[in-house]
Amino acid sequence: MGKGGSLSDGVLRKIILSYAYVSIWIFLSFTVIVYNKYILDKKLYNWPYPISLTMIHMAFCSTLAFLLVRVFKLVEPVTMSRELYLSSVVPIGVLYSLSLWLSNSAYIYLSVSFIQMLKALMPVAVYSIGVLLKKESFKGDTMANMVSISVGVAIAAYGEAQFDSWGVFLQLGAVAFEATRLVLIQILLNSKGITLNPITSLYYVAPCCLAFLTLPWIFVEFPLLRNTSSFHFDFIIFGTNSLCAFALNLAVFLLVGKTSALTMNVAGVVKDWLLIAFSWSVIKDTVTPVNLIGYGLAFLGVAYYNHSKLQAMKAKEAQKKAGQADEEAGKLLEEREGEGMGRKSDSQA
Protein backbone atom coordinates (compact mmCIF):
# COMPACT_ATOMS: atom_id res chain seq x y z
CA MET A 1 0.00 0.00 0.00
CA GLY A 2 2.80 2.37 0.98
CA LYS A 3 4.76 1.49 -2.13
CA GLY A 4 1.69 1.87 -4.36
CA GLY A 5 0.80 5.14 -2.65
CA SER A 6 4.27 6.59 -3.19
CA LEU A 7 4.14 5.55 -6.84
CA SER A 8 0.79 7.23 -7.39
CA ASP A 9 2.06 10.33 -5.57
CA GLY A 10 5.07 10.42 -7.92
CA VAL A 11 2.89 10.04 -11.01
CA LEU A 12 0.51 12.73 -9.72
CA ARG A 13 3.43 15.08 -9.05
CA LYS A 14 4.79 14.47 -12.56
CA ILE A 15 1.38 15.21 -14.11
CA ILE A 16 0.98 18.40 -12.06
CA LEU A 17 4.48 19.58 -13.03
CA SER A 18 3.82 18.84 -16.71
CA TYR A 19 0.62 20.89 -16.62
CA ALA A 20 2.51 23.64 -14.79
CA TYR A 21 5.23 23.78 -17.48
CA VAL A 22 2.58 23.84 -20.22
CA SER A 23 0.64 26.61 -18.45
CA ILE A 24 3.76 28.73 -17.93
CA TRP A 25 4.76 28.36 -21.59
CA ILE A 26 1.26 29.21 -22.85
CA PHE A 27 1.07 32.24 -20.53
CA LEU A 28 4.49 33.60 -21.56
CA SER A 29 3.98 32.94 -25.27
CA PHE A 30 0.56 34.57 -25.05
CA THR A 31 2.03 37.54 -23.17
CA VAL A 32 4.91 38.13 -25.61
CA ILE A 33 2.59 38.06 -28.64
CA VAL A 34 0.02 40.43 -27.11
CA TYR A 35 2.77 42.69 -25.68
CA ASN A 36 4.49 42.98 -29.08
CA LYS A 37 1.15 43.77 -30.69
CA TYR A 38 0.51 46.46 -28.06
CA ILE A 39 3.89 48.13 -28.64
CA LEU A 40 3.86 48.01 -32.45
CA ASP A 41 0.20 48.75 -33.20
CA LYS A 42 -0.38 52.37 -34.25
CA LYS A 43 -3.73 52.39 -32.44
CA LEU A 44 -2.21 51.25 -29.11
CA TYR A 45 1.31 52.18 -27.86
CA ASN A 46 2.14 53.42 -31.37
CA TRP A 47 5.82 52.51 -31.68
CA PRO A 48 5.89 50.91 -35.17
CA TYR A 49 9.59 50.02 -35.29
CA PRO A 50 9.82 46.21 -35.54
CA ILE A 51 13.56 46.11 -36.29
CA SER A 52 14.31 48.24 -33.23
CA LEU A 53 12.07 46.09 -31.03
CA THR A 54 13.74 42.90 -32.28
CA MET A 55 17.20 44.40 -31.66
CA ILE A 56 16.21 45.36 -28.09
CA HIS A 57 15.11 41.74 -27.51
CA MET A 58 18.34 40.35 -28.99
CA ALA A 59 20.57 42.71 -26.96
CA PHE A 60 18.72 41.83 -23.74
CA CYS A 61 18.74 38.07 -24.46
CA SER A 62 22.42 38.12 -25.50
CA THR A 63 23.38 39.78 -22.22
CA LEU A 64 21.40 37.41 -20.00
CA ALA A 65 22.53 34.33 -21.95
CA PHE A 66 26.16 35.44 -21.59
CA LEU A 67 25.68 35.84 -17.82
CA LEU A 68 24.07 32.38 -17.49
CA VAL A 69 26.70 30.63 -19.62
CA ARG A 70 29.95 32.47 -18.89
CA VAL A 71 29.54 34.28 -15.55
CA PHE A 72 27.21 32.13 -13.41
CA LYS A 73 28.01 28.95 -15.42
CA LEU A 74 24.47 27.61 -14.94
CA VAL A 75 24.40 26.31 -18.53
CA GLU A 76 27.25 24.46 -20.24
CA PRO A 77 28.46 26.03 -23.52
CA VAL A 78 28.85 23.90 -26.66
CA THR A 79 32.31 23.24 -28.06
CA MET A 80 32.32 25.09 -31.38
CA SER A 81 35.09 26.16 -33.74
CA ARG A 82 35.13 29.50 -35.54
CA GLU A 83 34.64 27.76 -38.89
CA LEU A 84 31.58 25.87 -37.59
CA TYR A 85 30.13 29.07 -36.15
CA LEU A 86 30.52 30.97 -39.43
CA SER A 87 29.29 28.12 -41.66
CA SER A 88 26.41 26.88 -39.48
CA VAL A 89 25.34 29.31 -36.76
CA VAL A 90 25.57 32.55 -38.78
CA PRO A 91 23.17 31.37 -41.56
CA ILE A 92 20.72 30.20 -38.88
CA GLY A 93 21.07 33.55 -37.09
CA VAL A 94 20.41 35.50 -40.29
CA LEU A 95 17.24 33.47 -40.98
CA TYR A 96 16.10 33.90 -37.36
CA SER A 97 16.55 37.67 -37.48
CA LEU A 98 14.61 37.88 -40.76
CA SER A 99 11.83 35.74 -39.31
CA LEU A 100 11.53 37.91 -36.18
CA TRP A 101 11.73 41.15 -38.16
CA LEU A 102 8.95 40.16 -40.57
CA SER A 103 6.71 38.54 -37.94
CA ASN A 104 6.93 41.61 -35.69
CA SER A 105 6.24 43.84 -38.71
CA ALA A 106 3.05 41.89 -39.44
CA TYR A 107 1.54 43.00 -36.10
CA ILE A 108 1.34 46.54 -37.48
CA TYR A 109 -0.97 45.47 -40.29
CA LEU A 110 -2.84 42.33 -39.15
CA SER A 111 -4.94 41.26 -36.18
CA VAL A 112 -3.52 38.85 -33.59
CA SER A 113 -6.19 36.27 -34.45
CA PHE A 114 -5.45 36.29 -38.19
CA ILE A 115 -1.69 36.04 -37.62
CA GLN A 116 -2.24 32.87 -35.56
CA MET A 117 -4.31 31.44 -38.41
CA LEU A 118 -1.54 32.15 -40.91
CA LYS A 119 0.99 30.49 -38.59
CA ALA A 120 -0.88 27.21 -39.12
CA LEU A 121 1.06 27.04 -42.42
CA MET A 122 4.30 26.33 -40.52
CA PRO A 123 4.11 22.49 -40.93
CA VAL A 124 3.43 23.01 -44.66
CA ALA A 125 6.50 25.23 -45.03
CA VAL A 126 8.75 22.94 -42.94
CA TYR A 127 7.71 19.83 -44.88
CA SER A 128 7.97 21.50 -48.30
CA ILE A 129 11.42 22.97 -47.61
CA GLY A 130 12.51 19.65 -46.08
CA VAL A 131 11.54 17.88 -49.31
CA LEU A 132 13.34 20.50 -51.44
CA LEU A 133 16.52 20.17 -49.34
CA LYS A 134 16.15 16.35 -49.31
CA LYS A 135 15.74 16.21 -45.55
CA GLU A 136 12.21 14.81 -45.87
CA SER A 137 10.99 12.17 -48.31
CA PHE A 138 8.00 13.02 -50.48
CA LYS A 139 4.82 11.14 -49.48
CA GLY A 140 1.49 11.54 -51.22
CA ASP A 141 -0.64 11.27 -48.07
CA THR A 142 1.51 13.82 -46.21
CA MET A 143 1.35 16.25 -49.13
CA ALA A 144 -2.45 15.80 -49.27
CA ASN A 145 -2.54 16.74 -45.58
CA MET A 146 -0.40 19.81 -46.31
CA VAL A 147 -2.85 20.81 -49.07
CA SER A 148 -5.78 20.51 -46.62
CA ILE A 149 -4.00 22.82 -44.15
CA SER A 150 -3.30 25.32 -46.94
CA VAL A 151 -6.93 25.24 -48.10
CA GLY A 152 -8.09 25.87 -44.51
CA VAL A 153 -5.79 28.89 -44.17
CA ALA A 154 -6.91 30.18 -47.58
CA ILE A 155 -10.57 29.97 -46.45
CA ALA A 156 -9.66 31.80 -43.21
CA ALA A 157 -7.90 34.49 -45.26
CA TYR A 158 -10.95 34.82 -47.55
CA GLY A 159 -13.14 35.47 -44.50
CA GLU A 160 -10.74 37.96 -42.87
CA ALA A 161 -12.48 41.30 -42.27
CA GLN A 162 -9.20 43.26 -41.87
CA PHE A 163 -7.25 41.67 -44.72
CA ASP A 164 -4.04 43.51 -45.65
CA SER A 165 -1.97 42.14 -48.53
CA TRP A 166 1.33 43.60 -47.28
CA GLY A 167 0.76 42.23 -43.78
CA VAL A 168 -0.01 38.76 -45.20
CA PHE A 169 3.15 38.94 -47.33
CA LEU A 170 5.22 39.83 -44.25
CA GLN A 171 3.76 37.00 -42.15
CA LEU A 172 4.15 34.40 -44.92
CA GLY A 173 7.75 35.57 -45.37
CA ALA A 174 8.31 35.12 -41.63
CA VAL A 175 6.88 31.58 -41.81
CA ALA A 176 9.13 30.75 -44.79
CA PHE A 177 12.30 32.03 -43.09
CA GLU A 178 11.45 30.28 -39.81
CA ALA A 179 10.73 26.98 -41.58
CA THR A 180 14.04 27.23 -43.47
CA ARG A 181 15.82 27.92 -40.18
CA LEU A 182 14.28 24.83 -38.55
CA VAL A 183 15.33 22.61 -41.47
CA LEU A 184 18.85 24.07 -41.54
CA ILE A 185 19.25 23.41 -37.81
CA GLN A 186 18.82 19.71 -38.60
CA ILE A 187 21.19 19.86 -41.59
CA LEU A 188 23.92 22.18 -40.24
CA LEU A 189 23.91 21.38 -36.51
CA ASN A 190 22.02 18.22 -35.49
CA SER A 191 23.61 16.14 -38.26
CA LYS A 192 27.02 17.10 -36.79
CA GLY A 193 25.98 16.01 -33.29
CA ILE A 194 25.51 19.57 -32.01
CA THR A 195 22.36 20.22 -29.98
CA LEU A 196 21.56 23.70 -28.71
CA ASN A 197 19.00 24.31 -25.97
CA PRO A 198 17.16 27.67 -25.95
CA ILE A 199 19.79 29.29 -23.68
CA THR A 200 22.84 28.20 -25.68
CA SER A 201 20.90 29.06 -28.85
CA LEU A 202 20.50 32.62 -27.59
CA TYR A 203 24.15 32.69 -26.47
CA TYR A 204 25.38 31.86 -29.98
CA VAL A 205 22.57 33.14 -32.24
CA ALA A 206 21.30 36.35 -30.57
CA PRO A 207 24.56 38.36 -31.04
CA CYS A 208 24.57 37.29 -34.70
CA CYS A 209 20.95 38.48 -35.09
CA LEU A 210 21.78 41.78 -33.43
CA ALA A 211 24.75 42.35 -35.75
CA PHE A 212 22.78 41.43 -38.88
CA LEU A 213 19.78 43.66 -38.02
CA THR A 214 22.03 46.68 -37.48
CA LEU A 215 22.45 47.21 -41.23
CA PRO A 216 18.74 47.46 -42.19
CA TRP A 217 18.07 49.40 -38.97
CA ILE A 218 20.58 52.12 -39.97
CA PHE A 219 18.83 52.69 -43.31
CA VAL A 220 15.18 51.92 -42.48
CA GLU A 221 14.38 52.91 -38.89
CA PHE A 222 17.24 55.00 -37.54
CA PRO A 223 16.36 58.07 -39.69
CA LEU A 224 12.72 57.83 -38.54
CA LEU A 225 13.68 57.50 -34.87
CA ARG A 226 16.12 60.41 -35.16
CA ASN A 227 13.32 62.63 -36.46
CA THR A 228 10.92 61.54 -33.72
CA SER A 229 11.95 64.04 -31.07
CA SER A 230 8.93 63.24 -28.88
CA PHE A 231 10.05 59.66 -28.23
CA HIS A 232 11.74 58.78 -24.93
CA PHE A 233 12.93 55.24 -24.24
CA ASP A 234 10.52 53.66 -21.76
CA PHE A 235 12.65 51.31 -19.67
CA ILE A 236 9.63 49.75 -17.95
CA ILE A 237 7.78 48.90 -21.18
CA PHE A 238 10.78 47.66 -23.16
CA GLY A 239 12.49 46.09 -20.14
CA THR A 240 9.47 44.00 -19.14
CA ASN A 241 8.78 43.14 -22.79
CA SER A 242 12.36 41.88 -23.25
CA LEU A 243 12.22 40.01 -19.94
CA CYS A 244 9.06 38.22 -21.09
CA ALA A 245 10.78 37.28 -24.37
CA PHE A 246 13.75 35.82 -22.48
CA ALA A 247 11.51 34.05 -19.97
CA LEU A 248 9.67 32.46 -22.90
CA ASN A 249 12.94 30.86 -24.04
CA LEU A 250 13.48 29.51 -20.52
CA ALA A 251 9.93 28.13 -20.57
CA VAL A 252 10.65 26.38 -23.89
CA PHE A 253 13.77 24.86 -22.29
CA LEU A 254 11.70 23.56 -19.35
CA LEU A 255 8.75 22.38 -21.42
CA VAL A 256 10.76 20.44 -24.00
CA GLY A 257 13.25 19.16 -21.42
CA LYS A 258 10.63 17.93 -18.94
CA THR A 259 7.98 16.79 -21.44
CA SER A 260 8.56 16.67 -25.21
CA ALA A 261 8.58 18.79 -28.36
CA LEU A 262 5.25 17.21 -29.33
CA THR A 263 3.73 18.45 -26.05
CA MET A 264 4.81 21.96 -27.03
CA ASN A 265 3.15 21.56 -30.44
CA VAL A 266 -0.13 20.49 -28.81
CA ALA A 267 0.15 23.32 -26.27
CA GLY A 268 0.75 25.69 -29.17
CA VAL A 269 -2.61 24.76 -30.67
CA VAL A 270 -4.32 25.53 -27.34
CA LYS A 271 -2.45 28.86 -27.18
CA ASP A 272 -3.56 29.79 -30.71
CA TRP A 273 -7.23 29.23 -29.87
CA LEU A 274 -6.83 31.28 -26.67
CA LEU A 275 -5.22 34.11 -28.64
CA ILE A 276 -8.03 34.07 -31.18
CA ALA A 277 -10.59 34.25 -28.35
CA PHE A 278 -8.61 37.06 -26.64
CA SER A 279 -8.22 38.99 -29.88
CA TRP A 280 -11.98 38.81 -30.47
CA SER A 281 -13.18 39.48 -26.91
CA VAL A 282 -10.62 41.94 -25.49
CA ILE A 283 -8.84 43.64 -28.42
CA LYS A 284 -12.19 43.63 -30.29
CA ASP A 285 -10.72 42.28 -33.53
CA THR A 286 -13.33 40.96 -35.93
CA VAL A 287 -13.40 37.16 -36.19
CA THR A 288 -15.88 35.94 -38.81
CA PRO A 289 -17.56 32.49 -39.08
CA VAL A 290 -15.60 31.91 -42.32
CA ASN A 291 -12.38 32.63 -40.34
CA LEU A 292 -13.27 29.95 -37.82
CA ILE A 293 -14.35 27.38 -40.44
CA GLY A 294 -11.10 27.85 -42.36
CA TYR A 295 -8.90 27.75 -39.27
CA GLY A 296 -10.87 24.73 -37.96
CA LEU A 297 -10.00 22.84 -41.15
CA ALA A 298 -6.35 23.88 -40.89
CA PHE A 299 -6.37 22.91 -37.20
CA LEU A 300 -7.57 19.37 -38.04
CA GLY A 301 -4.80 19.06 -40.62
CA VAL A 302 -2.14 20.21 -38.14
CA ALA A 303 -3.52 17.84 -35.47
CA TYR A 304 -3.37 14.91 -37.92
CA TYR A 305 0.19 15.88 -38.89
CA ASN A 306 1.28 15.92 -35.23
CA HIS A 307 -0.43 12.55 -34.69
CA SER A 308 1.38 11.07 -37.72
CA LYS A 309 4.73 12.38 -36.46
CA LEU A 310 4.06 10.83 -33.04
CA GLN A 311 3.23 7.45 -34.58
CA ALA A 312 6.38 7.60 -36.73
CA MET A 313 8.49 8.42 -33.64
CA LYS A 314 6.95 5.49 -31.73
CA ALA A 315 7.57 3.10 -34.64
CA LYS A 316 11.18 4.27 -34.94
CA GLU A 317 11.73 3.85 -31.19
CA ALA A 318 10.20 0.36 -31.25
CA GLN A 319 12.39 -0.60 -34.20
CA LYS A 320 15.46 0.72 -32.38
CA LYS A 321 14.62 -1.29 -29.25
CA ALA A 322 14.01 -4.43 -31.33
CA GLY A 323 17.39 -3.96 -33.01
CA GLN A 324 19.11 -3.57 -29.63
CA ALA A 325 17.37 -6.71 -28.33
CA ASP A 326 18.48 -8.70 -31.40
CA GLU A 327 22.04 -7.43 -30.95
CA GLU A 328 22.10 -8.43 -27.26
CA ALA A 329 20.64 -11.87 -28.11
CA GLY A 330 23.31 -12.35 -30.77
CA LYS A 331 26.08 -11.47 -28.31
CA LEU A 332 24.64 -13.86 -25.72
CA LEU A 333 24.47 -16.66 -28.29
CA GLU A 334 28.09 -16.03 -29.30
CA GLU A 335 29.17 -16.15 -25.64
CA ARG A 336 27.36 -19.47 -25.11
CA GLU A 337 28.83 -20.93 -28.28
CA GLY A 338 32.28 -19.79 -27.12
CA GLU A 339 31.76 -21.43 -23.72
CA GLY A 340 30.59 -24.65 -25.44
CA MET A 341 33.67 -24.74 -27.67
CA GLY A 342 35.88 -24.17 -24.63
CA ARG A 343 34.31 -27.06 -22.74
CA LYS A 344 34.60 -29.33 -25.77
CA SER A 345 38.31 -28.59 -26.19
CA ASP A 346 38.85 -29.20 -22.43
CA SER A 347 37.15 -32.64 -22.61
CA GLN A 348 39.20 -33.62 -25.66
CA ALA A 349 42.38 -32.68 -23.81
Image (cartoon, grey):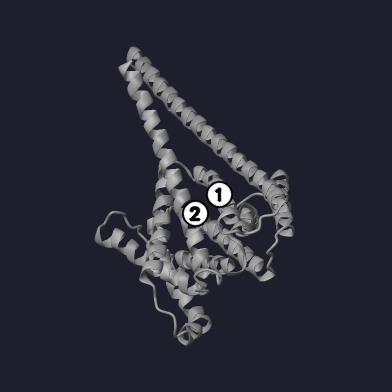
**Residue farthest toward the left in the current orientation of the protein:** 72
**Percent position of residue 34, x then y:** 51, 59
The quadrant where residue 61 appears: bottom left
Quadrant in the picture for the C terminus? top left
Q: Quadrant location of the N terminus?
A: top left
- The numbered mark at residue 15 is none
**Which amino acid is tagged 1?**
Leu
Q: For mark 2, what is the residue?
A: 30
In front of the other: 314 or 339: 314
Report x, y in % for residue 89: 45, 64
How would you rate the neighbour count of disc 1 (Cα within 10 Å): few for under 14, some for 14-19, many for 20 or more?
A: some
Q: Seen in the image, is 242 located left or right of residue 321?
A: left
Residue 155, image x, y percentages: 74, 54
Answer with left or right where residue 127 lies relative to residue 15: right
Residue nearest the observer in this picture, 238 or 268: 238
Is disc 2 placed on a helix, strand or loop? helix
Residue at 55% in and 39% down: 313
**Residue holding disc 1:** 274
Q: Nearer the viewer, residue 6 or 110?
A: 110
Mark-to-mark CA distance, 1 and 2: 8 Å
